[in-house]
Amino acid sequence: MSLLDIHVLGSPILRQETTPVERMTDELRRLIDDMFDTMHAAKGIGLAAPQIGRSERIAVIDVEDNPIVIVNPEIVITEGSAKAEEGCLSIPEIYGDVERPARVTIRALDRDGERFELQASELLARCLQHEIDHLHGKLFIDYLSFLKRRSALAKWESMRKDFPQNIRKFPPGEMAGRHGEEAL
Ligand code: NI
């Protein structure tokens, strides 16, 4: 098991487009294992490759003990709309309400490179959309109103000195999730 450093807001890779994976390899499967370990250590329910400084189009999700790997995911159907609070492992301690489609159908490859389709609602639908956004350089704060975004960024500015080089490390015994909230 190895824990990866998490890039936080301000790290340029969080705003970059990812590159589709052409072929699953053992190296990528090891990366996926490390992403799950890192996400669980950080008490998150989703983690996308740019958040650990990688440019592959890969994310991992674990909502209600249902681990899912999505490689090259695409949203093919959206329905309805729902608003709920989101957080992000790359923007610790900042939360905000985000309105998104309530239900989605996605297509992706799994860790073996096999295609699959998944229909989701509620928290899983939200998490899938949040992670797929990460794979295209988009963050949940982009959806906040001007005023809410401004106050979130002001709070972030006061905290970012805690993250030198825009990196969040997880020393043993000092894990995140201080408020017991789920971050994506
Ligand atoms: Ni996130």
Image (cartoon, rainbow, N blue to C red):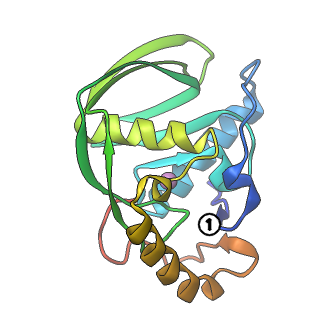
**In the picture shown, does residue 36 fall above or below 124?**
below
- Image quadrant in which you'd find residue 33: top right
Front-most of 98 and 21? 98
| In the displayed structure image, the side of residue 70 where residue 53 appears, left or right | right
Front-most of 95 and 163? 95
Q: Residue at x 61, y 82 (%)?
A: 160
Image location (x, y in percent) of residue 134:
57, 45
What residue does disc 1 label?
Answer: 9
Front-most of 174 and 48? 48
Image location (x, y in percent) of residue 140:
46, 54
Q: Residue at x 75, y 41 (%)?
A: 55
Q: Is residue 97 in view from this perspective?
A: yes
Label 1 crowd bin: few (<14), some (14–19), many (20+), radius 10 Å: many
| In the displayed structure image, the side of residue 18 where residue 79 appears, left or right | left
Image location (x, y in percent) of residue 162:
61, 86
**In the picture shown, does residue 153 fall above or below 61?**
below
Q: Is residue 173 in view from this perspective?
A: no
Image location (x, y in percent) of residue 91:
52, 67
Residue type pointed to by label 1: Leu
